[in-house]
Image (cartoon, rainbow, N blue to C red):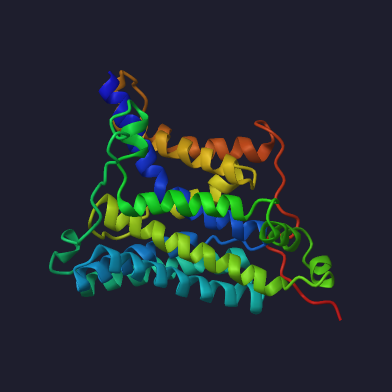
Amino acid sequence: MSAVIDELASGGVRLAVPLLLASSGELLSERAGVLNLSVEGMMLTGAFAGAAGALASGSAAVGALTALAAGLAFAALQALLSITLRADQIVTGITANALALGGTTYGARLLFGDGKADSVPGFDPLPIPGLHGIPVLGPALFQQSALGYVAFLVAAALAFGCSRRTPWGLAVDAVGEDATTADRCGLPVRAVRYAAVLLTGATAGLAGAQLALSEVHAFSDNITGGIGYLAVVAVIAGRWRAWPTMVACLFFGVAQSLQFAAPALGLHISGPLLTTLPYVFALLAVSGLVGRSRAPSGLTVPFVRAG
């Protein structure tokens, strides 16, 4: 039974890592007032670019950097549409995801049509001596790939950076709550929002690389499978706060891992039911049944400088 618990914990954390990365950036963007439903497309593009870069260079590190660049490019387009052109953020996000799915599927046919998608160089687990043997926590936290450890550091840095203990966090919250007042106080509203969206692209691109290069060492059509949308759900479930969002990501990861561990634990729960758990939890969070929840006042509201 202990082996099953270890597997459940390690599987839950492993599945939560890309979600943790993507939701960390999405949290920052939403608190700045920009809803990035396109985080799914950013992740998918990052996974494709990471696999292509790793295959072309023979280096997983190059693949991760390629994924990062792809996520940033995708985010720059999203920022241009949402912030500069003030397009509807929900419509542009859904459209961008559809384009990313079609584009990466077509690109995979061109680059990976001969089966090369199943032989992509990737990151192997790097157990930390003396720590990876700790029951439950060891397999879950200290047997990650190099990119997995980077994900933990990035998520922690963003959690601290967007807190109200830092000038950057205060600026992000001010812009997300009332952009007009923030502008009158001298804050560069568009610059803050651009930075938040670009950081979302960077984290989502790395999240896609984590999927393709650390989890499966391959690329397949729609490899993200809705994880980007789940990142948005995690932010909502975490009530737009960093540490609760991380807990929500871990909960979602364990819920997904439970699909594979349930038979060994003697739990006869249908897989589709377990798949819906994260979304049910998000609905409970939004409804206020698990605590008060309030989105930033300026979320999805375009900024127009007063004359």
Q: Is residue 226 in sight in this rendering? A: no
Point out residue 71 in the picture as x, y percentages from the top left corner. 44, 68
Q: Nearer the viewer, residue 131 or 289?
A: 131
210 vs 285: above or below: below
Q: Nearer the viewer, residue 77 or 190?
A: 190
- Residue at the (38%, 39%) spot, across then down: 13
Q: Residue furthest right?
A: 307
Q: Is residue 191 left or right of residue 50?
A: right
- Residue at the (84%, 72%) spot, across then down: 184
Q: Nearer the viewer, residue 33 or 222?
A: 33
Point out residue 294 in the picture as x, y percentages from the top left corner. 72, 46
Residue 263 found in image quarter: top left
Q: Quadrant of the C terminus?
A: bottom right
Q: Is residue 138 left or right of residue 196?
A: left
- Residue at the (60%, 57%) spot, across then down: 28
Point out residue 204 in the picture as x, y percentages from the top left corner. 45, 60
Point out residue 144 in the picture as x, y percentages from the top left corner. 32, 45
Q: Residue furthest front?
A: 130
Q: Is residue 269 in sight in this rendering? A: yes
Q: Quadrant of the N terminus?
A: top left
Q: Residue furthest left?
A: 114
- Residue at the (77%, 66%) spot, across then down: 179
Residue 113 found in image quarter: bottom left
Number of marks in the image?
0
Q: Is residue 2 left or right of residue 194?
A: left
